Image (cartoon, rainbow, N blue to C red):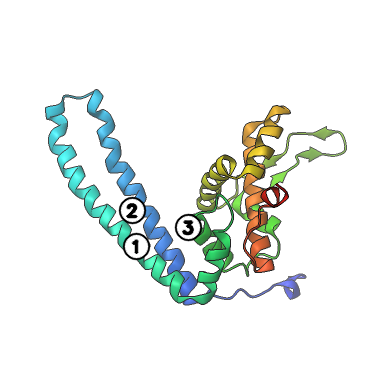
Amino acid sequence: MSHIHELKLSELPQDDFIELRLLLAEREKVVKAINLFAATAENKNYLPAQVLKTTLHHNKIIMAALSKQLKQIEKSVDTLIKRNDVFNHQDELLQSIPGVGRQTSIMFIAYTQAFTLFKTYHQFACFAGVAPFEYSSGSSVRGKTKVSPLANKKIKTALNMAALTAKKYDPQLKLYYDKKVAAGKNKMLVLNAIRCKLISRAFAVINRNTPFVNTLKAVA
């Protein structure tokens, strides 16, 4: 109670943010359902074809319906992004970053509330569970840096895919990755550093209000 004066009242997000998050949640359900039905086909090498025939036939019909619904949800997301000027502009800026595709861009917009919920990229990195923290006890006991298990798993997964893509196609990050791994750094730690770099770039392009510029290419 002595700190109640420091309490800040939260505000409900605008309808567009609520709708965007809801659509993302529904999309995730449909994608998971498609993957679950698709997994049945993995048994084709272990069970007689005649036994699986009927089940796979039904699965095919269900997956076709789910895929159609997935396209409808993604179309609704596109409509929402385009009708909101802030969403649309930020989406264009974010997708200028190598490795950041449409889904990652939308995740950024949805979970930062168009970059209004977090003051710094490091705060969002903590929220996403990719910011490294050093373990220490007193002045003598120190352990390896670790990320917190308390994280938004959806964003962390999206960032992981974005980091893998960036590592492959962005010359600057590819050079960074290869250099660190060659120096003996753990590959997953280096990949996590790339996740943090992508978050940093996202906040930078939004704060500058200009698309991403690859400085390595500019120098070349």
Above or below for 171 versus 79: above
Q: Secondary structure at mark 2?
A: helix
Residue 102: image tag: 3
- Camera-side mark, 2 or 1: 1
Left-right relation of 15 to 196: left
Left-right relation of 162 to 74: right
Q: Secondary structure at mark 3?
A: helix
- Camera-side mark, 2 or 3: 3
Report the residue marked by disc 2: 30
Give the image quarter of residue 39. top left
Neighbours of disc 3 within 10 Å: few (<14), some (14-19), many (20+): some
| First-in-chain label (2 vs 1) | 2
Residue type, label 3:
Arg
Residue type, label 2:
Val
Report the residue marked by disc 1: 73
Please provide percent x and percent y for residue 92. Answer: 53, 65
Neighbours of disc 1 within 10 Å: few (<14), some (14-19), many (20+): some
Give the image quarter of residue 118. bottom right
- Camera-side mark, 3 or 1: 3
Neighbours of disc 2 within 10 Å: few (<14), some (14-19), many (20+): some
Depth check: give the residue in front, 115 or 145: 115
Quarter of the image for the N terminus: give it. bottom right
Depth check: give the residue in front, 21 or 1: 21
| First-in-chain label (2 vs 3) | 2
At a point 69% along the width and 67% down the height, the residue shown is 208
**Mark 3 and 1 residues: CB-CB less than 8 Å, in contact?**
no
Please provide percent x and percent y for residue 59. Answer: 20, 43
**Mark 2 and 1 residues: CB-CB less than 8 Å, in contact?**
yes
> Mark 3 to mark 1: distance in Å?
14 Å
Q: Secondary structure at mark 1?
A: helix
Please provide percent x and percent y for residue 17. Answer: 49, 71
> Mark 2 to mark 1: distance in Å?
9 Å
